[in-house]
Amino acid sequence: MSETTEPAPLGSRTTLFHHALRLHRENPDAPLPRDGEPYPDDEHHRGRRFRTRRDMRTQGADAAAILDAHFGDEDAPASDLADAFHDVDVPIQHNDHVAAAALRADRRRVQNTGRWLVRHSTDRCSALVGLALLATDRADEDIPLIQTIGLLSNSFGALAAKALRRRTGDGQALLWLAHRVTGVGRVYLVEELCRCQPHAAREWLLRHACDGDCLNGYFAGQVAAAAHLHEAITGAELDDDLVDHTGRLLHVMATCDGMGTTLAHYPPAAIVLAAHSTHLGRQAPAADRYLTAALIADDLTTAPPEQSGCTTEQRDELVRRYVSVLNRQDWCDAMHADTNRDDDFIARFASKVAARLRLRAFIKPGNDPSPTE
């Protein structure tokens, strides 16, 4: 029986692939709840620990050795690998040892083995190795398989992103998956989208890359640079999604020191900040826009100007412009009408950000400052 049609072992647990597919059918246009966790093999992986290697260059070597032995036997079926990797440390990202083992073997057999492991593995380690094998190839027919297992993005997102970018230069397969993942999986997908050339993913990156997760800090600066944010926000073709997302990017880059590119290391920072503050005043008042703009202004106020890529004069003018918009009566009314915020969040925001900026929407009657000109 060929490796493409070989059935899963009798009595096996639910496969990782079937688990992802079932959840995707229930949530076709959204990320899987909790990234699909717990996985079907969770009880077999809970509490597992591997000894830290003294030389990280050898990580993946044990898995590669198992692959070499398997491919060295011409008659060994893919099912022999179903539980072969459970007791070795399998990397979740591209690994040179595993990739080399794939390249040493017959390409067609590597393809078939990778497909079988991704589709039939009941253990995440074997499914990861299968995906790693597919990530060394370029066959377009594997895209749906890779996308489906990639929906379990915390474990499979990194390899799925690599595998998809090898297959589609226009980034469309990556975009499909990026739209349906969150957390660390989104980091892997967005980083690969930033590397796509030509940049067919630019419109999505400019409007949807940041979803509010704290991990957005790893890629916000990459998005701003790769998608040429400074050209888009100062151009003629603007829309609310672009302006709103620019605000999210600016706030993330102002606060992501130690994670990714900050405003201090983003040369057009002052230009983009000025453009965003200008466009903000032309938008309809909304609570989300209010809060983002206030956080940006507070970021500018509480850090030295050079940390925002500005001179002192530029920083002061930007804060004045942001506060001027936020203190307009229609913007205050929009914030007062908002009922979607947690009371604790609003209390913290009022006592810190709003107090520092003297925002009218949060000042008690009788202490109202004069509207900023």
Image: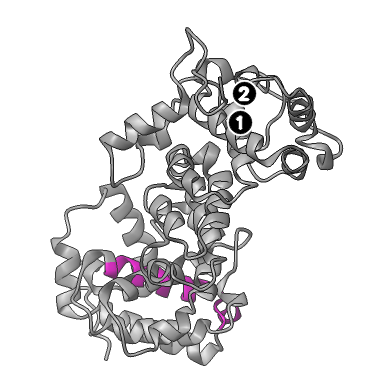
Quarter of the rendering occupied by the N terminus = top right
Q: Mark 1 near mark 2, Cβ–Cβ under 8 Å?
A: yes
Q: Does dot 2 land on a helix, a strand or a loop?
A: helix
Residue at x-position 40% and y-position 32%? 20
Q: Is residue 339 left or right of residue 185?
A: left
Give the amino acid type for the residue marked by disc 1 in the picture.
Thr
Taking the view exactly as shown, the residue that stands out farthest to the top is 11
Instruction: Say few, some or many: other residues with alpha carbon within 10 Å of mark 2 (under 14 / 14 to 19 / 20 or more).
Output: many
Whole-percent x and y of residue 55? Answer: 86, 39
Q: Is residue 96 above or below residue 12?
A: below
Is residue 341 placed above or below 22 in the rendered structure?
Answer: below
From which residue to which does the magenta span run?
Answer: 289-309
Residue pointed to by mark 2: 78
> Residue lying furthest right in this view?
54
Give the residue type that dot 2 points to. Answer: Ala
User: Seen from this angle, which residue lies furthest front?
Assistant: 1
Q: Which residue position is annotated with label 1?
A: 113
- Quadrant of the rendered image containing residue 329: bottom left
Q: Is residue 354 above or below residue 312?
A: above
Reply above or below: 155 against 5. below
Magenta-span inclusion, residue 290:
yes
Camera-nearest residue between 28 and 345: 28
Distance between the alpha carbons at the discs numbered 1 and 2 = 5 Å
Relative side of 335 to 205, left or right: left
Tell me the quadrant of the picture where the C terminus can be found.
Answer: bottom left
In this view of the protein, which residue sits in the foreground, 299 or 250? 250
